[in-house]
Image: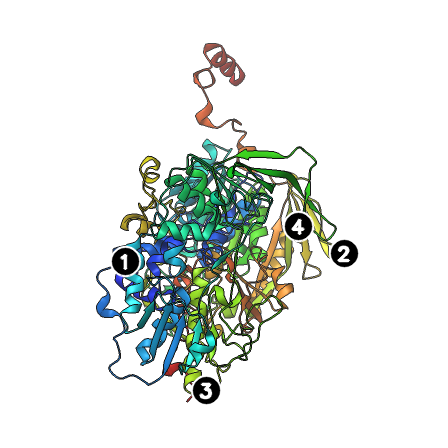
Amino acid sequence: MTYLQKPKLHHPQLPTNGLGFTHRDYEGAISTLCAGCGHDSISSAIIQACFELSLPPHRIAKLSGIGCSSKTPTYFLGQAHGFNSVHGRMPSVLTGANVANRELIYLGVSGDGDSASIGLGQFAHSIRRGVNMVYIVENNGVYGLTKGQFSATSDLGSKSKKGAVNTDSPIDLVSMALQLGASFVGRSFSGDKRQLVPLIKAAINHHGAAFIDCISPCIAFNNHAGSTKGFDFVREHNEAVNYMDVMIGREPIVADYAPGTVEVVTQHDGSVLRLRKLVEHYDPSDRLAAINYLQERSASGEIVTGLLYVDPKADDLHDHLNTVARPLNELGTADLVPGAAALDKLNASLR
Amino acid sequence: MIAAGRYSDAYMVNWTSNVFPGVLGRTCDRPCEPACRRGRVEKEPVAICRLKRVAADNKDDIRARLPKVPEVRNGKRVALIGAGPASLTVARDLAPHGYEVVLYDADPKAGGMIRSQIPRFRLPESVIDEEVGYILGLGIELRLGQRVDSLKALLAEGYDAVFVGSGAPRGRELELPGRKEAAANIHIGIDWLSSVSFGHVDKIGKRVIVLGGGNTAMDCCRTSRRLGGEDVKVIVRSGFEEMKASPWEKEDAMHEDIPILNYLVPKEFLHTNGRLTGVKFEKVAAQYDAKGRRSLKPTGEPDQVFECDDVLVAVGQENAFPWIERDIGLEFDKWDMPVVDAKTMQSTLPKVFFGGDAAFGPKNIIWAVAHGHDAAVSIDKYCNGQDVSQRPPPMVTLASQKMGIHEWSYDNDISNDARSVVPLRPKEVALKDVRLEVELGFDSKLGYKEAERCLNCDVQTVFTPALCIECDACTDICPEDCITFTANGTEEDLRTRLTAPAPNATQALYVSSALKTERVMVKDEDVCLHCGMCAERCPTGAWDMQKYLLEMTHAGPACRSQ
């Protein structure tokens, strides 16, 4: 099967960012996923977020495992570093890469099979360790590549395309991430870029383990009546707690909201998140309340989306381990072999 | 079709509407190219004109595909005055339907200004003979070398209709001091070109000044270069930018070492002993009043004299109808031009129709052809006793181009190439022979390359709201960012909320009815590449690519009311 290439011609008045790039410069190869796949929308949101943040693509590393979602890094940021790892092992490879070179931006892209089934342990430990990364799960609640079996995130009672009813309890990765200590947790929907793009931008600017669960309808196998991950169901049951603007540097604040409806969060790197609250008493700095709220809404069949929890002052793995600040590939012989005097000093300290 | 190498098919499609693909493929004023949408997404439009020539040059013998001379005539007689592009178009449209068409022209050969005014190095005689021949072969009665001196007398011959396509045959004079005294070396541009075309003139002085800034001036100066003119210059009153000549014709002239001097108003022809020695010019500058109107004001600098052996005056053309009696019921306006309906081409004398330069003053060949088509429809309706103002709209068909997954029955792989430049004959060779065609045209390889730049305006993106699930796939993939899903509003309001700016208000937005989320789909057609990516990525077939075919109304039974 051949795929038509996307024409290189673009809109003559396409805006450019601080680096002089258009959003087209952040694209990758043409997608070979099914037409209409939610994953393609998420790729597009990642492209838009990186464009708006004026990120140099070659300072980004995109890592993935196996599955439809894990194919997507090919379809965005063609100039970035990429690593397509073993099924479910993306978190470990990402952790290793991050330890070796903390200067890149790490984008882990995974799916519900890759993270909630085979890679559940890997997922848990990377979050628990506070690896500085953006971990996006493109969650469609179905095994698309193997023709539509229920996945570990399929809701209890939801129906497969053929009509079978799921009898297993679902894994809620957002609740798990909150319990495991993620310092940035969000959920969004591939069909709502107004919410998703700022969420990805904020996650990229976050210092620590940022986790985004993004519901992404599978057009081929999970977008029918009875599905809880299809466009219609998610649109009907989407309960967004907030929408957000991400302010970088000294961008002028143009939006004007009624007092008390905006919460301002300043992250480690100085980026400012302006949260427009939709649910009045929702407090995204309260981990416990977030977990409770999620359970409560989930019980009544609603899907809570938005920035659910953020700890703007969080530490990451490097802070915990007190590792060397420079990337390992920049360390020379003098750094790595400090000589007998340094060894003597070390030995003395242990006596 | 050109990309697919179907040159004969492409030629026939073109022949139906523009009648002279080979001629126009070399000489057209190209009003189509500024409209070409390629120019909106990139620097330059598709070289449409040159592609027409590619089809004409590379086609097979198409004579068998031309309409046949009808075996039975319909008994109606139509006289066409002037054998130029307008009359020939009328003849082409009417003859196959059984009309007895009689073509008059003062020149010995048919073709009108195509033959008399366009220099042979731009348009070889063989091309004219071929394309004019296709029409004459339809059983037209020729009365060449026969000037019509009286419309009254012609009408008395009992024609059912008369079409006047006599052009704008008179070159405008430039009455300046010295004009009479130096008359031997001052020539009227179009008359001189015509004399060159018919072989009556074959040389000119070494130093030539061409006055005027239109395409005729460009033809005059380039012809001069080929007839012995070594120091040839074009001198215009206005600014270089405002000249009427097509930009490419100016380029062609300058390429042949012809300088174009501007803001110089001719004042006097200088002469000694009855022989032209030069032209005196006043220097002017453009000034704009509060309303932005331009006037040319003398700068006060001393006058400038350019020496020369010959002057060619190409400062415009005029219509002249001394042969139309003013008492036959055909009204003339205050500029002494016939009153002609712009839609039906009918004059105030119902059986007389006008077209080409004769109708509304000098324009270009392709307009003459358009007039000819319209006049032919009118004549056909008139001769059938029908109201000429009632004209059926063009035929339109839309057909899906989807063949299968990733398969479309049109070429949607848009080329990124820039417009190709046409190869020219080397200057040293080209300037030696006034009959040697200077442009070589695109070969089939360049023609393919250029055709691939086409953005397929004939293939429309058709959206079916009921099928849309609002997955955003089309918005995400669109290379021009021209699709937006947003709340409905007025067009003005919608334009402020699009994914990418849509500043061209002359191109309407494509807005769907309300979708499930009560939003609407808005598409800015202005810069759409018709690449089909939206339809390709649409999971439900809400987007489809449909071929759009516009069939203009032509003379014949189809144009008549039932």
Among the two numbered marks 3 and 1 on one chain, the one whose residue lies closer to the N terminus: 1
Q: Look at the picture and state if A324 lies above or below B277.
A: above
Image coordinates for residue B392, horizontal then vertical, percent: 45, 80
Instruction: Tell me what residue is drawn at x 41 percent, y 73 percent.
Output: B552
Q: CA distance from mark 4 to mark 1?
A: 64 Å
Q: Quadrant of the N terminus of chain A?
A: bottom left
**Which is more foreground, mark 3 or mark 1?**
3
Please name the residue that numbered disc 3 is placed on: B386
Q: Chain of mark 1?
A: B
- Left of B172 or right of it: where is B452? left
Q: Where is residue A43 shown, x and y percent of the image? A: 47, 52
Mark 3–mark 1 CB contact (< 8 Å):
no
Would residue B411 appear left or right of B348 to someone viewing this image? left
Q: Is residue B119 visible?
A: no
Q: Do discs 2 and 1 share a chain?
A: no
Q: Name the amino acid type tagged 2.
A: Gly
**Amino acid beneath label 4:** Ser
* Amino acid type shown at disc 3: Gln
Is the residue at mark 4 from the same chain as the one at mark 3? no
In the displayed orientation, state which residue is furthest to the top.
A341
